[in-house]
Image (spheres, helix red, strand yellow):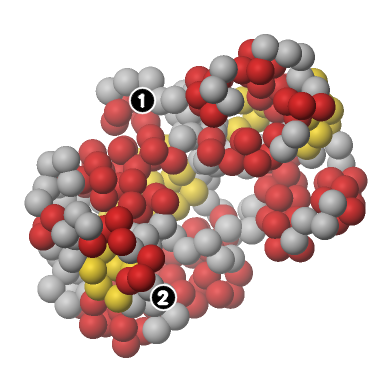
Amino acid sequence: MLLITGASGNLGKSTIDFLLKHLQPEQVGAMVRNPDKAGALTSRNVPLRQADYEDYPSLQKVFEGVEKLLFISTSVTGEERTRQHSNVVKAAHEAGIRHIYYTSIVNPSADATFGATPGHFETEKAIKETGITYTFFRNNLYLDLLPDIAGNAVESGSLYFAGGEQRAGFVLREDIAEAIAKVILRKEQESQVYTISAPQTYSFYDVAVALSKAANKPVKYIPISTDYMRKSMKDAQVPAPVIDISTNMADALQKGEFDYPDNTLRSILQREPVDVETFLKQFYNM
């Protein structure tokens, strides 16, 4: 049996949708924290297993009889992520799971600026130490984030962001989900690492050009400092956690931590991944 953790989240649900094109519902288990939020899964007869990354005994229970695990990383960072991910890896090893698919990040390292990256580095290391075979999907930033980052740029004609001149390989979440499903269906036996990024990377100057084409009006990128970005977001009464995540991502972007073009995703999908311009045109219905 294949079990997907975080199955009621966007990436988990999308991956299950692609898997169900080739597998029967009973072959795909869905681990969720709150079954009340998993209506889309129950309507498709996907078996639910309730557990929480923080609740080790619940993980022990739901991992019984599981052969392969798609471990979708949590959204938290720091010590909380380390604790939760350690619980998952330890319980998987204890349950005798034979293969772990893990959603990681491009270029994981212990001293990265981006707050989520060290946790991914630690989790990959922990999985390797179990001796379980693995598949790591080292994903770049979600393309889906761009409209939130752009804010009112189309209306104002100005895209303010602390991205400097650096670039990122933005990838559509649906493309990531499809790629994960395709790799799972290959039934690989050996450990593998896949860099899931765009074939070309984009600066925010490029994003502004794509916004201009999508809106059929000029949009100019105006680089700002992270300090100014933080102050502006605070003045706009943006919640503090959102400010912290956004400015941290901008700092990491400025240091080139997402500038990793790669053709692996194109190869898995056997087509071109959705690019920035196509996505923004579709999003703004232009």
**In the displayed structure, would residue 265 be above or below residue 148?**
above
Residue 38 visible within the image: yes
Q: Which disc number belongs to residue 266?
A: 1
The answer to whether residue 206 is seen in the rendering is no
Q: Amino acid at mark 2?
A: Tyr
Q: Say which quarter of the image contains residue 8.
A: bottom left
Look at mark 2 in the image and give the residue it sits on: 53
Residue at 22%, 57% (x, y): give it: 43
Instruction: Kindly identify the residue that appears in the image at 52 percent across and 70 percent down.
Output: 81
Kind of residue indicated by mark 1: Arg
The residue that appears at 31% across and 38% down in the rendered structure is 179
Q: Name the secondary structure under disc 2.
A: loop
Q: Residue at x 53, y 35 (%)?
A: 143
Q: Is residue 56 left or right of residue 229?
A: left
Residue 228 to residue 2: above or below: above
Specify few, some or many for label 1: CA neighbours under 10 Å numbering under 14, 14-19, or 20 or more: some
* Relative horizontal placement of residue 228, taking residue 143 as reference (left or right): right
- Counting the numbered discs, the total is 2
Q: CA distance from mark 1 to mark 2?
A: 32 Å
Q: Quadrant of the C terminus?
A: top right
Callout 1–callout 2 Cβ contact below 8 Å:
no
Q: Nearer the viewer, residue 162 or 89?
A: 162
Please state which of the two labelled residues, at mark 1 or mark 2, is closer to the viewer: 2
- Is 168 in front, or is 240? 240
Which residue is nearer to you in this view: 281 or 167? Answer: 281
Horizontal and vertical percent for residue 84?
46, 74
Image quadrant holding the N terminus, namely bottom left
